[in-house]
């Protein structure tokens, strides 16, 4: 059955372009259009699409407000289109808080190395989030207003993610009662893609200020977005969160977010370990940043003293790096299928026999604190 899509944008050119790209795939059907946020809300109720593509900036009712109304009345997977600017990044992160699942740049040349790859990426994203439709969504029980972020350091309340998502219950699951293994660690590494911004926020906001190890964050995200995302997390979390920079010394209780468009490695030994952040011109590596690249470097630097977590995301980035970590004696966890927006990355690790635990998103922070021993 084809994934039914509602395309929302105030530009007739962009609506037509998105529609033409999507309908090149036989498994996608564009069933309607909307030219502003208000019409999007009405069409979502009338047409009941499997996926909505939504512009952030629109007349009458903006994209963020439209997402909030749609998720309150008729929860639907929403893919945002955004400009690669600081304001665009902030607005897109607000849209994700409001309930959107993922985003792409409006300029297709910014999506991938060539036009064909960009087309495939858009089609695949729509199909992946469309497959999580209907039974996976629950009507929200409460809403939290999204306060626009005026500066990078503004602190604002987090949206309660389980209120609007895929069966993400706040009730603890049986895995939350599992005891710590007793293994000792020196660092935590977390890799993710589609659905990752909200997943990372869910986990990191629950960690205590005395978290004893550095944390590496690898999120597939454009370069224009990672500074705003790091600043947002830093304003919400008890631990410190920063966009990684060349030469950063690894410190306990600090989470380092790999910059978009670059790779993040570990250099040095012992207490002198620092981060290497660099532009990667390799055509062999698809993702920049890449979970595989950072995981492999972490395995080399810390051997088995690593707790790595692979969260929701398309594809299999992280599997090869997790294999290197596993061979070095590290512990690998994966998010479970039920709470993943897209089960690609966690499934790749789990199917390869590399993960020792499959954990619901709501339990990851609790398990981390218990396993690390800082609760």
Image (spheres, rainbow, N blue to C red):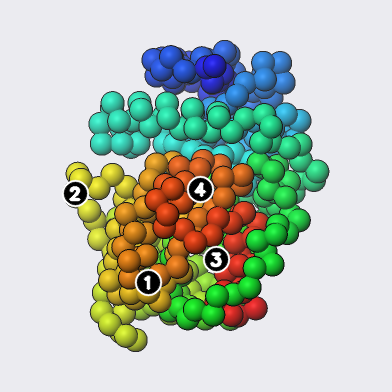
Q: Position of residue 63 (x, y in %)?
A: 60, 33
Name the residue nearer the viewer: 189 or 115. Answer: 189
- For marks 2 and 3 on the same chain, the one whose residue lies earlier in the sequence: 3
Could you tell me if the residues under marks 2 and 4 are in contact, i.e. CB atoms within 8 Å? Answer: no
Label 2 neighbour load within 10 Å: few <14, some 14-19, many 20+: few
Residue behind mark 4: 312
Residue lying furthest bottom: 271
Q: Position of residue 263 (x, y in %)?
A: 29, 58
Name the residue nearer the viewer: 131 or 234. Answer: 131
Task: Look at 80% across and 43% down and name the residue there.
Answer: 141
Q: Which mark is residue 329?
A: 1
Marks 1/4: CA distance?
Answer: 23 Å
Residue behind mark 2: 282
Q: For marks 4 and 3, give the one nearer the viewer.
A: 4
Q: For marks 2 and 1, give the one nearer the viewer.
A: 1
The quadrant of the image that shows the C terminus is bottom right
Marks 2/1: CA distance?
Answer: 29 Å
Could you tell me if the residues under marks 3 and 1 are in contact, i.e. CB atoms within 8 Å? Answer: no
Residue behind mark 3: 234
Residue 61 visible to the viewer = no
Q: Is residue 70 above or below residue 196?
A: above
- For marks 2 and 4 on the same chain, the one whose residue lies earlier in the sequence: 2
- For marks 1 and 4 on the same chain, the one whose residue lies earlier in the sequence: 4
Which element is circle 3 on?
helix
- For marks 2 and 1 on the same chain, the one whose residue lies earlier in the sequence: 2
Marks 3/1: CA distance?
Answer: 31 Å
Marks 2/4: CA distance?
Answer: 25 Å
Could you tell me if the residues under marks 2 and 3 are in contact, i.e. CB atoms within 8 Å? Answer: no
Which element is circle 2 on?
loop
């Amino acid at each position: 059955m084809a994934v039914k899509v509602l395309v929302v944008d105030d530009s007739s050119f962009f609506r037509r372009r998105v529609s033409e790209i999507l309908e090149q795939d036989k498994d996608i059907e564009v069933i309607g259009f909307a030219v502003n946020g208000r019409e999007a809300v009405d069409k979502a109720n009338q047409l009941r699409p499997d996926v909505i593509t939504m512009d952030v900036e629109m007349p009458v009712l903006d994209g963020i407000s439209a997402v909030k109304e749609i998720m309150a009345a008729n929860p639907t997977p929403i893919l945002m289109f955004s400009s690669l600017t600081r304001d665009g990044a902030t607005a897109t992160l607000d849209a994700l808080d409001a309930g959107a699942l993922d985003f792409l740049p409006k300029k297709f040349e910014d999506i991938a190395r060539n036009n064909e790859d960009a087309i495939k990426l858009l089609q695949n994203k729509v199909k992946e989030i469309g497959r999580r439709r209907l039974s996976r969504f629950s009507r929200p029980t409460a809403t939290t207003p999204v306060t626009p972020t005026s500066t990078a350091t503004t602190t604002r309340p987090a949206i309660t993610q389980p209120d609007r998502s895929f069966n993400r219950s706040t009730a603890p699951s049986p895995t939350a009662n599992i005891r710590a293994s007793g293994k000792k660690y020196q660092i935590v590494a977390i890799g993710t893609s589609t659905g990752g911004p909200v997943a990372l926020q869910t986990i990191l906001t629950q960690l205590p200020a005395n978290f004893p190890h550095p944390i590496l964050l690898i999120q597939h995200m454009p370069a224009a977005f990672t500074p705003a995302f790091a600043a947002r997390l830093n304003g919400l979390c008890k631990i410190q969160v920063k966009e990684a920079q060349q030469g950063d010394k690894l410190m306990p209780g600090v989470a380092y977010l790999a910059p978009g468009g670059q790779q993040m490695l570990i250099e040095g030994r012992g207490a002198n370990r620092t981060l290497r952040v660099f532009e990667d011109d390799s055509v062999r590596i698809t993702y920049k940043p890449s979970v595989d690249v950072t995981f492999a470097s972490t395995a080399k630097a810390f051997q088995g003293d690593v707790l790595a977590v692979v969260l929701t995301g398309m594809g299999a980035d992280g599997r090869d790096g997790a294999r290197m970590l596993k061979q070095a004696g590290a512990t690998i966890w994966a998010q479970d299928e039920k709470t993943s927006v897209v089960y690609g990355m966690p499934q790749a690790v789990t199917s390869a026999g590399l993960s020792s635990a499959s954990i619901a998103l709501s339990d990851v922070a609790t398990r981390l604190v218990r396993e690390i021993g800082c609760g």
